[in-house]
Amino acid sequence: MKNIQQLRTKTESPREQWVDVTVDIDPDHHMVRLMESNGDIHEYMSSNVRALAHAAAHNRGRAQWCEKYQQLLVPGASNVSGGIPFYKLEPKPVALSA
């Protein structure tokens, strides 16, 4: 019989973890750049980029990212965004070559 720890290890993946990131936003292009503490950079798109930019500025660009759910949590964002601390991000479209 398997113990709970063995079952947890099989069902949890690193993708389900929330990681600390720094957020850099280009509102004109709806682009969100996430920088992990190890230097990895990921780019995403957001349809709610202006509200996200406002929330991130309020929090000095600090946030947490969950890759599995593609959710960005900006702690304290509800103070400036009307109660929305989570933002859904979409993968950046891949440019097609000619």
Image: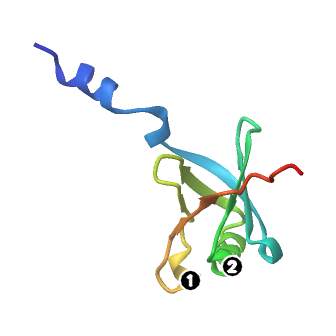
Residue 54 image label: 2
Q: Could you tell me which residue is drawn at 33 percent across and 24 percent down?
A: 9
| Structural crowding at the residue carrying mark 2, measured as other residues with C-alpha within 10 Å and reported as few (<14), some (14–19) or many (≥20) | some
For the residue labelled by badge 1, is the local secondary structure a helix, a strand or a loop? helix
Q: Could you tell me which residue is drawn at 48 percent across and 33 percent down?
A: 14
Direction from residue 93 to residue 47 in the image, left or right: left
| Structural crowding at the residue carrying mark 1, measured as other residues with C-alpha within 10 Å and reported as few (<14), some (14–19) or many (≥20) | some
Residue type marked 2: His
- Find the distance from the CA under tag 2 to the CA under tag 1: 8 Å
Residue 60 image-quadrant placement: bottom right
Picture coordinates of residue 50, whole percent (x, y) = 69, 80
Direction from residue 19 to residue 37 in the image, left or right: right
Which image quarter is the N terminus in?
Answer: top left
Residue type marked 1: Ser
Residue 72 image-quadrant placement: bottom right
Which residue is identified by label 1? 81
Compared with residue 20, is residue 78 higher up or lower down, i.e. above or below?
A: below
Q: Could you tell me which residue is drawn at 31 percent across and 31 percent down?
A: 11
Direction from residue 92 to residue 20 in the image, left or right: left
User: In the displayed image of the protein, which residue is found farthest to the right?
Assistant: 98
Picture coordinates of residue 52, whole percent (x, y) = 64, 74
Residue 2 image-quadrant placement: top left
For the residue labelled by badge 2, is the local secondary structure a helix, a strand or a loop? helix
Q: Are marks 2 and 1 in contact (CB under 8 Å)?
A: yes
Picture coordinates of residue 7, whole percent (x, y) = 24, 24
